Amino acid sequence: MKTTEIKNELKEKGYIHIPFPNRLDASTVSEILGKQLFTTLIKENPQSTRLLASNQDVDLHTDHIKAKFIAWQCNSQATIGGESILMDGLGALGNASEDLLNSLQNIYVKSHRLFFDDKPHYPLFSDKVLYYASFLCEAPIGLKEKQAYAWFQEQIKSTSKIEIKLSEGDWLIIDNHRMLHGRKGFEKKSNRLLTRYWLSGQAI
């Protein structure tokens, strides 16, 4: 798949699924989508307390705000479950009033605090950037903010979702400032293994 095709599909849909066989590797993806900020192996680890290392469902969220794009390379997949779930978060805000959008900008989400210059928190929505994880959201203070947050939660429930089950050798890339992502749970002791790359987006 050509570089222009990847960029155009990300701009149009907010995500792209690139099935195997393909000629993509980590360095090629970085050339297209910017510097690699952080790389993680995503696999089940019974010794870990992190949800990411479990076999459980993961609710819709975005990752670190500095990651413009997220790319997953599938090394192996669970036999049952493990589907990636996507939702166009910015698209869900398309019908929001100006008042609602302003209120969402006054709702803060705690930072992942991985980099030395990370701020303590960031707005849920600002300048066409969505940053959201339910477990990181600080309690809205004002009435308008509480109503806006309840409205946003309802949009997450009611907006249609995209399900993609990656196979070995597949890539899935999303615009992390636009798309919410999660996953379905899978059987214990599976061989599911994904490599996740956070990318700066500066090459776009």
Image (cartoon, grey):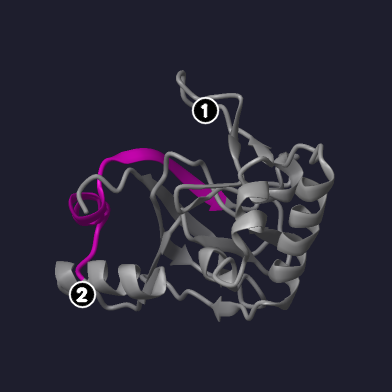
Measured along the vertical axis of the image, is residue 108 above or below residue 57? above
Rendering quarter of residue 22 = bottom left
Quadrant housing the N terminus: bottom left
Instruction: Point out residue 97 in the picture as x, y percentages from the top left corner.
Output: 62, 64
- Residues shaded magenta: 23-42
Instruction: Point out residue 4 in the picture as x, y percentages from the top left corner.
Output: 16, 70
Answer left or right for 36 relative to 104.
left
Q: Which mark is residue 178?
A: none
Q: Secondary structure at mark 1?
A: loop
Residue at 47 percent across and 44 percent down: it is 40
Instruction: Point out residue 184 in the picture as x, y percentages from the top left corner.
Output: 68, 69
Q: Which mark is residue 5?
A: 2
Nearer to me, 66 or 94:
94
Residue at 75 percent across and 54 percent down: it is 149
Rendering quarter of residue 157 = bottom right
Q: Is residue 63 magenta?
A: no
Nearer to me, 155 or 20:
155
> Does residue 24 appear in this view?
yes
Q: Which mark is residue 114?
A: 1
Q: Secondary structure at mark 2?
A: helix
Residue at 24 percent across and 45 percent down: it is 202
